Amino acid sequence: MHRQNSTITYYIYLSAAVVFLLWASPSLAHVEQGQAVGFVTGLEHPWSGLDHVLAMIAVGLWGAQLGNPALWTLPVTFPMVMSLGAMMGLLGIPVPGIEIGIALSAILLGAMVLGEVRPKLYIAAILVGFFAIFHGHAHGTELPAGQSGLLYSMGFVIATGVLHGIGITIGTIHCWPAGKLALRGAGAFIAAMGIFFLWRALI
Amino acid sequence: MKINHQANILPKTLIAASGLLYCPSDAAAHLVTTGMGPVYDGIGHLLLTPEDLVPALAMALYAGLRGRAPGRRVLFFFPLAWLLGGFIGLAANTMPGFPVTAFSFLLIGILIAADLRLPDHAFTVLAVAVGIMHGFFNGIALKAGPAGLGLLGIMSALFVLVAIVSAFVVSLKPPWARIVVRVAGSWVAAMGLLMIGWFFRGQK
């Protein structure tokens, strides 16, 4: 009888100890959760869609063909207006025909590179800026739950800028005659892909 | 018999108690400390908080674009204004419910991207205003932790950061290098626009 009592007392103390351990005071820890993930997600996102990648590279290629100041004006215009498009998406302002707009951006920007079209700087900037709204609206708001909006935005903008940089770097071959031809070929490829994206958006 | 009954209840009590594991209480956030004291906590806070670090870097870039004399002025005014704002924040209790930091991203980013030449006094006022505003938020955030010493750490880190970055930009001679800085400014402005969007989406 005495032994049974001591066993029960042992279990009571054990339960009390377990309950005490589980009833922990609030943990004063882990702020900033998912922050780094948000940055990486933002950095990865622009690379996940071929339509976005080709349009970004086309901006860089066209800028390289046009030379200064379009070389840097277009890649400056694009992320800023793209963010405006993303902000419209975040505020719930609808933009009609987003997929069609993105496909048209590849077609027109590819055609500009193909034809080595040299409009006035402001016209080029308006064209690039117009299509940036569609890209921003479509991609800028796709933040997975629990991640930092700021770091996602940082990653997204930086990755877009890097894609422009890749386009500009490829575009430096423009200084050689064979390079000019290759660039126009790249423009034709981007425009053809744009037609494919348009077909896919319409059906 | 009574004892046996009690003995049967005990495992159930243990199982019920273990169920508490799945109902943790809310985590109360606090500042991440470096373990090296309040001054380093402040430095760590600045370096690990993109909402503060990016505008500070952007201000240094803009100061560098403006040249030596404005750069020197910002080197002293900006960290001191940040410290002043921090002390105001330590005494304050409420956070403004408006994305003011996002607007500092946007404003400084546009100024850099456009390479806009503000008059000297306007540029100084801008640096002081941005410093006070970010310092104010830091003061509120550091109140429960490193407090005043943390703010001193932030001010020291800012001084070093602004000195290095703005001096680097001042030393840039090739035109393309300044263009790279302007492109970076456009990215900061783009981030500011997105932050404003995220803020208003959060309000819905």
Image (tube, coloured by chain):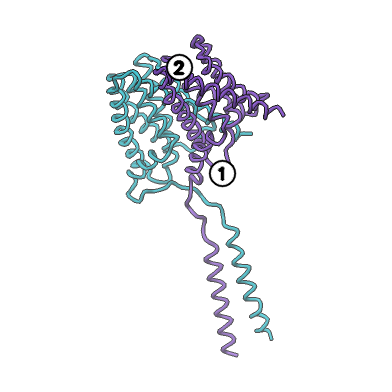
Chain colours: A purple, B cyan
Q: Quadrant of residue B119?
A: top left
Residue B70 vs residue A189: left or right? left
The answer to whether dots 2 and 1 both sit on one chain is yes
- For the residue marked with disc 1, what is the amino acid? Gly
Instruction: Check the residue under mark 1 and report the chain it is in.
Output: A
Label 2 secondary element:
helix
Which residue lies most toward the right here?
Answer: A203
**Relative depth, front residue between B196 and B90:** B196
Residue A146's tag is 1
**Relative depth, front residue between B181 and A100:** A100
Q: Residues within 10 Å of mark 2 (few under 14, many from 20)?
A: many
Residue A65's tag is 2
**Relative depth, front residue between B98 and B43:** B43
> Which label sits in the foreground, 2 or 1?
2
Horizontal and vertical percent position of residue A56: 51, 26
Horizontal and vertical percent position of residue A10: 54, 80
